[in-house]
Amino acid sequence: MRIDKLLSEMGIATRRESAATARAGGVTVNGDVVKDLSRHINPEVDTVCYRGRAVEYNRFVYIMLNKPEGYVSATEDSRLPVVTELLPEELRHRELFPVGRLDRDTVGLMILTNDGQLAHTLLSPRRHVTKLYRFRASEPVCEGAEEKFRDGITLADGYECKSAVISLDPDRMGGLIELTEGKYHQIKRMIASLDNRVVYLERVQFAGISLDGSLERGEWRHLSAGEVSSLREKAGAIQ
C-alpha cells in the first residue's frame, strides 16, 4: 500500500496535506524520514508515523449509522441517494457496504463494514441473529397478535414466518418486534396480514448492538472494540 493511501484511508490527512507534511520531514517509516509518499509499504509490518504519532492500521472498518429516511441501503444507485454517501470521503474509499438492508423509508440502526466474511456470516439464516424494530401502525393492532407472531405469521404469498415476538404499547398503536430473519418488507407484510399498516419503522438493535441514542439521523460513529467483539462472537468468527 502506498504511504499516502494509508494516511488517507486511516483518516489522518488528505493526500495534499500529507504531501506537505512529508516535504517538511513530518512522515517517517520505521524511523526514517520519507518524502516520497508514493512508496509502497506493508502497513501490518512497517511503522508509519505522522507528525510524531504512529498511524494505527485497521484492515477492517465497522461503522454504526443512524439511517435517515430517503436513503437506499446500497453502495450505489442511479436515482436515489445511498447510505454510504453519509460517510466522509476517506471512509467511502474503504469500500464499506451495509450489513443487510433497510427499506428506503425505514430509519435507524445500520452497520457498515468492509469485512465481507463477518457480514456474510451475520446474515446467514442459520445464525438466527436477532433484529429489533420499533413500529407504529395506522390503527390499533388486533387482539391475539402476540400469539400469531409467536406461532409464526403466514404472509399473503403463503410464506410462513419463523416465530417472532411483538410487544405492544398500551394503546396497541405500535411497539417492538423482534425477528430472527429478514425477508423483503417483512414487518410491513406481517402487520398487513393483520389487516393493518405500518406508518413508521425504526431498527433499534441488530445482533445485540443497540442504536446509540446520541446519534442524530444521518450521523455515524465507529463501533467500539467491545461491539466488534460482540458481533464476532455472534457470528462465531475466530478473533
Image (cartoon, rainbow, N blue to C red):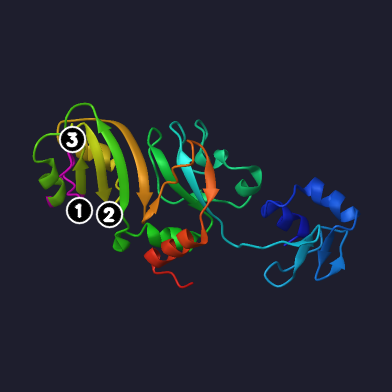
Asked if the residue under mark 1 is in contact with the one under mark 2, i.e. CB atoms within 8 Å, the reply is yes
| Residue 155 found in image quarter | top left
| Residue 36 found in image quarter | bottom right
Residue 201 place in picture, x, y as percent: 33, 36
Of mark 2 and mark 3, the one earlier in the sequence is 3
Q: Tag 1: residue type?
A: Lys
Residue density around tag 2, few if under 14, some if 14–19, many if 20 or more, within 10 Å: many
Of mark 2 and mark 1, the one earlier in the sequence is 1
What kind of secondary structure does the magenta stretch mostly adopt? loop
Residue 73 place in picture, x, y as percent: 45, 42
**Magenta residue check for 40:** no
* Lateral position of residue 106 relative to residue 92, left or right: left
Please determine whether, in this image, residue 210 is positioned above or below residue 77: below
Please determine whether, in this image, residue 68 is positioned above or below residue 183: above
Cα separation, mark 2 vs mark 1, equals 8 Å
Cα separation, mark 3 vs mark 1, equals 25 Å
Cα separation, mark 2 vs mark 3, equals 25 Å
> What number is the disc on residue 128?
none
> What number is the disc on residue 162?
1
Residue to which mark 2 is pinned: 180
Segment colored magenta: 151-164
Q: Tag 3: residue type?
A: Pro
Q: Nearer the viewer, mark 2 or mark 3?
A: 3
* Lateral position of residue 129 relative to residue 53, left or right: left
Residue to which mark 3 is pinned: 170
